[in-house]
Image: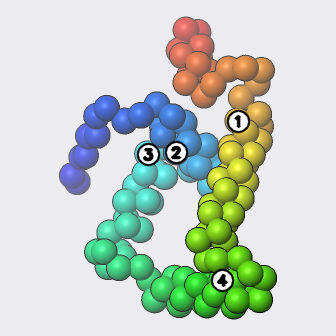
Amino acid sequence: MVRVIIEDVDPAAIERLEALAKENGRSLQAELKHLLEAAAQTQTGRLPAAMEVAIKKADLMRQQIASHTGFGSTELLKADREQALSSAIARLRQLKQAISPGEMSIREMIEEGRRY
């Protein structure tokens, strides 16, 4: 079996991956293995066909909305991004509160656990 070592990973990325692993009921190693295998199964540089269809439909919907509301597609895309970003930030805050007692981060909890 091949072993892969990845160095200098951003601690914030590790925290997000650990939260994702916990959400999926896996260890961090199992989650990373799952993500790598899923990425390897998709065609390099191409989205799955269903995703491409969904993106095309979303673009068409944006164009239709823009033609009826007077908003340009640029404004709609910016609004979509801002809404998605604020939603993602809110979800991450909820996850952090759910998995970390008090003000401790996941890393701090791990270090605290190692002390005992």
The residue type indicated by label 3 comes to Gln
| For marks 1 and 2 on the same chain, the one whose residue lies earlier in the sequence | 2
Task: Write down the residue under mark 1.
Answer: 96
Residue 25 shows up from this direction: no
Identify the secondary structure beneath mark 1: helix
The one of 14 and 75 positioned closer to us in this rendering: 75
Under tag 4, what secondary structure? helix
Task: Choose the circle earlier in sequence order: 3 or 2.
Answer: 2
Mark 3, mark 2: which one is toward the viewer? Answer: 2
The answer, for residue 97, to whether it is visible in the render is: yes
Report the label total. Answer: 4
How far apart, in angstroms, are the residues tagged by discs 3 and 2?
10 Å
Q: Amino acid at mark 2?
A: Leu
Q: Residue at x 58, y 19 (%)?
A: 108
Task: Please give the residue where the numbered disc 3 appears in the rendered image.
Answer: 29
Q: Percent from the top left, x then y, of residue 3? A: 24, 46
Q: Secondary structure at mark 3?
A: helix
Residue nearest the viewer, comparing 22 with 12:
12
Mark 2, secondary structure of its residue: helix
> Label for residue 17?
2
Report whether 96 appears left or right of 53: right
Q: Residues within 10 Å of mark 2 (few under 14, many from 20)?
A: some
